[in-house]
Amino acid sequence: MAGFDPAVFIENLAWMKPELLLAGFGLLLLLASATVPVAIRQVGGWLTLAVLAVAAFLVTAQLSAGSGGTVASTGAFPDIAGNPAFVVDGFAVVFKLIFLLGAAFTVLMSMKYPDTDGEDSAEFLALVVFSVFGMMFLASGTGLITIYIGLETMALAGYLLVGFRVQEKRANEGAVKYFVLGALASGILLYGISLVYGATGSINLYGIAASLAGDDSGAAGFLGLGVVLMLVGIGFKVAAVPFHMWAPDAYEGATTPATSFLATAAKAGAFAMLLRVFVTAFGDRGADWAPLMILLAAASMTVGNIAALRQDNVKRMLAFSSVGHAGYVLMGLIAVGLSGGDAAIRARGLLSVALYLFIYTFATAGAFALVALLRKNGQPGEMLDDFNGLVKRHPVASVCMLLFLLSLAGIPCTAGFIGKWWLFGAAIKVNLVWLAVVAVLNSVVSLYYYARVMVAIFIRDGDGESKIQVPLPLSAAIGAAGLFTLVIGVYPQPFIRLARYAVLMMGA
Amino acid sequence: MTEVSLPLFLVFAAVGVFGAVMMVTRTQPVHSALYLVLTLFSVAAIYVLLHAEFLAVVQILVYAGGIMVLFLFVIFLVRPPVPGEARWHGGRHVLLSAGLAVILACALGWHFLESAPAAAGNPSALLEGGNMEQVSMTLFRYYILPFETVSILLLVSMIGAIALARKGEGV
């Protein structure tokens, strides 16, 4: 057995520049907050934004690092069979950009109230950065151990972000529920992984795929049980019905920036893992797992949207709506599973998932930024009544909120329509017309509760308060989200081109 | 597995299952914890039978030692209810978990009756060069990435624990 070769190690590390940057910055941030707390309090948020931007640049650079401007699909850290544990390909790059985007919105929102909740304290920022670090391993990891550790890093930071307001009862309740159910889900996931390992003899996605390509009878029941348990575990993380119970409480209890982080970046991270595992390792058995996903998708959209109808708390409403959106996104994965080797359908499925997650990130982060905006005197403004007459108090933000809600509902001329068009089309391509119909009906249902917010903003009268002063970072977040939601709606081509990179998943 | 170790395996497996069943059926948390120690020890013994001595030692040090002490600390701190207060949670949970256990046992049993486990590995390969050396070679050569990433994971949990504890004091 060959020994450890430092040169090879460094060479492999060169593919992890964005990850190293984030880890290093997180550590420095903690050190700096201990030595120069006042300076960090003032500029920590902007520094974090700058580092996220540099990380996005490094990630994008990997896209063209190959010869001739193609994507550099490269694997690093090979295991004993030569299968990489970490790959850099188009899929990883696109998802990492989504994570960084979601994190950037969270940081912008957290800079609103400098002293109230300690949201801008260095620990909060460091946890966001470390969480994104973990997500990167969900997008790039191809060894199940590497992926699992990435998932736990992301999730642990998430539990802490939810419970950050120690004095707040709802935060404690949400964090404890999220933690206990999340730990249970991790246990189930690990059990599934160990069964899959027992059945295939490999802990690497490529190794599993190779082992499955070899025999097609064998450990079917055993393997199947493992795959089902893995799906349950990941289903918890994407908050798909029936594994969504934690989401409303966690979303409601967390501070609004943290909620936005859970709903955008953390959700995208779990989806990256779901896609990577099921497409790379079990891609050949797509027809076997797709029926389970169809059940999850149909249940998620229906239960999520119907439960959202009754919510008067906007954060809770958005939580249930995000459960519904997870159902829509699963349709893209179902199309990949049922593609049966048809490259065009597989590509459409992957593209639509990546595109939708981008669009969903803009709209959801924007909507949560509005909730953050309404907070006053340390009281959260998250009830529907808090939105009453907002149009008189801040017309621009009101119009942006209208855009976000229309986009989430999927109305034409907003980004959401484009995203749903691709996703529902992917389902129709694999002859799941009934699922697409269910999705469209659910979009109609969702319009009702989104309209309740619109009515509150534009028609109801508020208590005649004066205009709201919006801090710069928050207006930047709302403005950027609104702009992109509109631009993608009318001119989506550049984003479709970007999302197309997600099709490039490194083969074995 | 050799002829000699099969009866030993059966003994340890039976003790392990006994401990696990006792653990979930006791109403006194301290009793449950002690039965869990019994199960962990029998699993460690099975590791020895499989020539995974290093894993066996780790199992005893970390699980039967460290983690169990934490469990007991927590049980003492939160003051368990007196036996009369702790209620039997009724048949539904029992049925559900028994059903899951049967499904799992069937899937595993069916698989092992049909074919030998694919991931059994080769004990003789483990014996040459020493168990610990093999483990560390694998860990530091092929699993160096997750090994290093764990350090960030642990750091996150430490930061979080400190941040929450400090805020709890109202600082």
Image (spheres, helix red, strand yellow):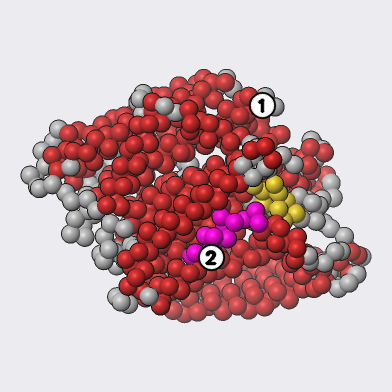
- Would you name the residue on which mark 1 appears? A343
Q: Quadrant of the C terminus of chain A?
A: top right
Q: Position of residue A377 (x, y in %)?
A: 18, 59
Q: Position of residue B2 (x, y in %)?
A: 91, 65
Q: Which residues are magenta?
A: A14-26
Query: What's the residue type where badge 2 is placed?
Result: Gly
Q: Is residue A186 left or right of residue A195?
A: left
Looking at the image, which residue sits at the far left?
A464
In magenta segment, residue A401: no
In magenta segment, residue A25: yes
First reached walking from the N terminus: tag 1 or tag 2:
2
Query: What's the residue type where badge 1 is placed?
Result: Ala
Q: Main secondary structure of the magenta part?
A: helix
Residue in the picture at 84% in, 50% down:
B116
| Res A442 seen here | no
- Would you name the residue on which mark 2 appears? A24
Cα separation, mark 1 vs mark 2, equals 39 Å
